[in-house]
Amino acid sequence: MLLGVFGCLLATSFCDKAASLAFRSDFVPKISAADRPAQTHDKLQDFVDIYDELNDNIDMYVDRKDDIRKPLKTVIEADAEFQAKLKAFQDSLTASKEDTKPFEFVLRNAVDDLNDSAQDHRKLLDEQEQAAKNRKKHKGDKQQQ
């Protein structure tokens, strides 16, 4: 289980670093304006790839029926942070439609993935909390017998 906590925290940390780079329109001032859309695309794709890896890790622990409530709480907090950063990034885009075209699809994909996953993470935490209550109740019932 420690690996599960560590794995989720590590993936969350990597997502945060990728988000910090991707969700800033001025992320690398030394890059020419002409190269910035392609670089933004690549950084957004890095974030999506790492975030997908985080979700794969969560799925693995769920399939093993591990109790991942603690790391899930951290992931849910990170989801909210990533959503805020992504929203701020979208709001800060002042480039013309042509400048955003190279990363428009991956940006939309990041928003959709993040929103869907955040909802799934909250639902999973609720399910895990309910399962823990049921285990505790079932354990108490066995002790009374």
Image (cartoon, helix red, strand yellow):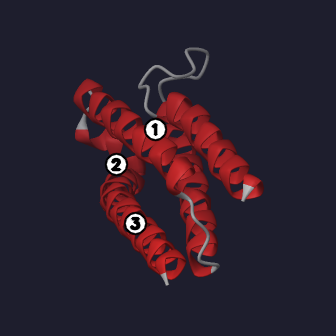
- Write down the residue under mark 1: 37
Q: Residue 52 is drawn in which quadrant? A: bottom right
**137 is higher (above) or lower (below) than 99:** below
The disc, 1 or 2, on the residue closer to the chain's N-terminal end is 1
Q: Badges 1 and 2: C-beta atoms under 8 Å apart?
A: yes
Mark 3 vs mark 1: give the one in front.
3
* Depth order, front residue of 19/133: 133
- Write down the residue under mark 2: 101
Q: Residues within 10 Å of mark 2 (few under 14, many from 20)?
A: some
The disc, 2 or 3, on the residue closer to the chain's N-terminal end is 2
Q: Residue 77, percent across and down?
A: 41, 39
**138 relative position to 52: left or right:** left
Residue drawn at the location 69% of the way across and 44% of the way down: 10
Q: Residue 63 is drawn in which quadrant? A: bottom right
Q: Residue 98, percent across and down?
A: 30, 42
Q: Residue 125, percent across and down?
A: 40, 60
**50 relative position to 73: left or right:** right
Secondary structure of residue under mark 1:
helix
Indicate the amino acid at tag 1. Answer: Pro
Secondary structure of residue under mark 2:
helix
Q: CA distance from mark 1 to mark 2?
A: 8 Å
**110 is higher (above) or lower (below) than 131:** above
Q: CA distance from mark 2 to mark 3?
A: 49 Å
Q: Which mark is residue 133?
A: 3
Indicate the amino acid at tag 2. Answer: Lys
Residue drawn at the location 63% of the way across and 73% of the way down: 60
Mark 2 vs mark 3: give the one in front.
3
Q: Badges 3 and 1: C-beta atoms under 8 Å apart?
A: no
